[in-house]
Image (tube, helix red, strand yellow):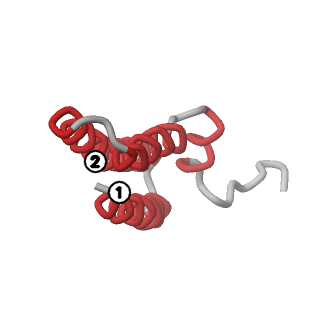
Amino acid sequence: VVLLTIVTAIQVVVLFRVQGARMQALADLQARLAAYRGRTVAMAASAEAVALFAGVIALLTGASWHAIPAYVLFAAVIAWTWPTPKRLIAAVAPQSVPDKYS
């Protein structure tokens, strides 16, 4: 379970970077919002799968410290991807917004 947690953590970081670059390449705001939702769901589902697997193993074999990293990863990914207004604007807004007065 610990090795699976490490691999999933690497996968979540790679997914964040790849999907973030893909979002910035999109020209339409609606397409960027859809890509943001997709990235959030994919990252949370990856971490959730490991936490559920660790939970099943803990139920079958008894509580052990091996499941704790999976739960911590799940909580960290949910906290990291929680769509606050500031994060949503930073992820979806164009990087260079021209000032209408300049």
Residue at figure coordinates x 32%, y 64% from the top left: 3
Q: For mark 2, what is the residue?
A: 50
Q: Nearer the viewer, residue 26 or 72?
A: 72
Give the quarter of the figure containing the C terminus: bottom right
Q: Which secondary structure, mark 2?
A: helix
Left or right: 22 with respect to 42? right
Image coordinates for residue 27, horizontal then vertical, percent: 45, 58
Q: Amino acid at mark 1?
A: Thr
Give the quarter of the figure containing the N terminus: bottom left
Tell me, yes or no, whether the two marked residues, 2 and 1, touch with CB atoms within 8 Å: yes
The extreme left residue here reads: 60
Q: Which secondary structure, mark 1?
A: helix
Cα separation between marks 2 and 1:
6 Å
Residue at figure coordinates x 25%, y 38% from the top left: 58
Image coordinates for residue 47, horizontal then vertical, percent: 34, 47
Left or right: 81 with respect to 86? left
Image coordinates for residue 87, horizontal then vertical, percent: 60, 42
Image coordinates for residue 63, horizontal then vertical, percent: 31, 36
Q: Which mark is residue 5?
A: 1
Q: Amino acid at mark 2?
A: Val
Q: Quick one: label 2, few (<14), some, or many (20+) residues within 10 Å? A: many
**Vertical placement of 43 versus 7: above or below?**
above
Q: Quick one: label 1, few (<14), some, or many (20+) residues within 10 Å? A: many
Residue at figure coordinates x 45%, y 65% from the top left: 25
